[in-house]
Image (spheres, coloured by chain):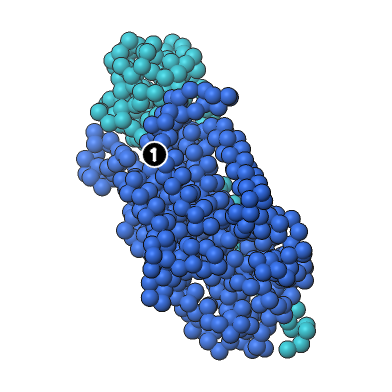
Chain colours: A cyan, B blue
Amino acid sequence: MSELTLFLIRVAYLAILWIFVLSAISVIRSDMFGARVPESARGAEPQPRRTGRAGRAGRAGKDKPPAKRRGSPTHVIVTEGSNVGERAELDGAPVLIGRGSDAAIRLDDDYVSTRHARIAASGDQWFVEDLGSTNGTYIGSVRITQPTTVTLGTQVRIGKTILELRK
Amino acid sequence: MAAGQQGAIMGFVHRRRRGAELFLLVLALAVGIGAYAAVGLGVEGEVPVDLLGYGGWLAGLVVAAHVVIRFVAPYADPVLLPVVAALNGLGLAVIHRLDLADGSALARQQLTWMTLGVLLFVGTLVVLRDHRVLTRFTYTSGLAAIALLLLPMVPGLGKTVNGAKIWIGVGPFSFQPGEVAKVLLVVAFAGYLVLHRDALALAGRRVLFVDLPRGRDLGPILAMWLISLGILVLQRDLGSSLLFFGLFLVMLYVATERPGWLVVGGAMFFGGAGLLYYVSVTTGQLSHIQNRVNIWLDPMAYFDQSPGSGQLVESLFGMAWGGLLGRGFGEGNPERIPYAESDFIIGAIGEELGLTGVIAVLLLYGLIVERALRAALISRDGFGKLMATGLAAVFALQVFVVVGGVTRLIPLTGLTTPFLSYGGSSLVANWVIVALVLRVSDLARRPVPSVGDDATDVAADAETTQVVRLS
């Protein structure tokens, strides 16, 4: 076997090795940036994200754009606890709930963390997600550990407060 | 630790990427089978006659693993299996190349072990549908790990190979139980720390800038770790003790988020190593430690002594001769390195594939560690996070200790190079580790199950609701 053939085999094998390494890396690259947003959520995604303020309740009277689908919730409201009646519109999603001043629904409840939970959309479903609160977020009697869907009328308990999605 | 990531995963769904995995697997097979063909061409001047049979067997194993992943872990990471397959294939070819030079038949045995490894990989994925089940076996696996580490000291069962009492022999087979103990210890540490990390991080008192946790929180795990470390020191297995020490520190640091542990652990490590060296110099006991350090500092001086540096020096010569592109398979003399097929396989690769090949191999290890850490990052439960981190640390430390030792960055301590080296126990254990990481990443990348839409749709509820078991 000539010197040249051996050299070519050597270089060809190193090339195969590196082609494999580089394609593995390129799969990871597309894996990082290519995480797909579900088709149905695309419409909702590019909306400007307005951060809710403490005084959102004051703007509640304004006309809302009609809901995309009949029966989908438009706002979240406090049904039990010290802030009964306080509400936030869902088109400013994600809606932050907590004791902090940047929360869309600010609760005066000692059992609520500063940034306690948030409500966000994925597709045409709404999710409540605990943000690492001290006392947890409950749906019924179950403490949630990951983003969980909520529908109209599902009672979400945060500290001594109960919230609901409403039309 | 768990909360910050959840927001990021809410908006999108990870893709399955099984097609990408298949594509990479084809390339990985090209790496493995191509190496085998290149070895044949380089050493014997012809394509090996059994190339089809060998390639078919390798392809069959890898494709079987891929098909099982498609069915039982559809969202698992697409890069891990191809990378592992490529490393294993390359290792087989290099061992085969050394066989041709030495007249041994280790590659055939290694292929048998790889078959067993893939079977256990498949078994792990099929049996273990949710890695959180392992939290039930926290203490069991800790005790099992210690029992396994003690096995080589049982008279009649243990075998001493090259001064290290880390083998057991049953009939014609020999096995290194420490390799399995490594996986069990990760499970035990992860299970314990996930329950007690709050207590470890918050309760306790401050001594000299460091918050020491209470004894009852740290006690069990510290005992488990000290016992396993003590056994390894008695067995003169320096590499594994280093690995376990590092593993313990990494997991403690990740669980408690206290950088202080790294400082304390690093100080303990260097203090202990210095003390051991001092003792071995002054008293003449523990001469193997002094040997290792002397060889590390000046390998050429001990070239032809009995516990000398011949192995290391031959490997250094080989790598120097290999240069940038290597000699090519069959053109170098890696058989001059004693035990080139186990601890010094990186030396053999450096000689015949050169720096270019060694960098590719190191990058592949980097990819394995990165994918395991990525699985830990996006995992939604603390146990999965800790276990994936621990397994990533096992890989990273092992490669660092071995490659650092062979390239004379640190004193040489014996450990196998994962997936490349000849050694059945290590190969099998590493396949199981990869199966565990794939399981964690599968659960982490799976779309969030929807709970609680019973108010609107009872029928859909029955199929989408998933019971989430806590701990």
Q: Quadrant of the N terminus of chain A?
A: bottom right
Residue B427 position, x and y percent, is: 48, 65
The correct choice, above or below, for B206 with respect to B3 in the image is above
> What amino acid does circle 1 point to?
Pro
Residue at x 62% of width, y 40% of height: B271
Residue B261 position, x and y percent, is: 55, 35
Q: In terms of depth relative to the viewer, which is nearer, B78 or A51?
A: B78
Residue at x 38% of width, y 72% of height: B170
Q: Quadrant of the C terminus of chain A?
A: top left
Q: In terms of depth relative to the viewer, which is nearer, B29 or A74?
A: B29
Residue at x 45% of width, y 45% of height: B225
Q: Quick check: can you spot residue A110? A: yes
Looking at the image, the residue that sits furthest to the front is: B283
Residue B352 position, x and y percent, is: 70, 73
Q: Which residue is mark 1?
A: B220
Residue at x 58% of width, y 24% of height: B208
The correct choice, above or below, for B266 with respect to B102 in the image is above
Check disc 1: other Cα within 10 Å, few if <14, some if 14-19, many if 20+.
some
Judging from the image, mark 1 belongs to the subunit labelled B
Q: In terms of depth relative to the viewer, which is nearer, B310 or A123?
A: B310
Residue B160 position, x and y percent, is: 49, 67
Label count reads: 1
In this image, A150 relative to A120: left or right?
left
The correct choice, above or below, for B132 with respect to A112 in the image is below
Secondary structure beneath disc 1?
Answer: helix
Q: Quick check: can you spot residue B440? A: no
In this image, B423 relative to A159: left or right?
right
The correct choice, above or below, for A36 with respect to B5 in the image is below
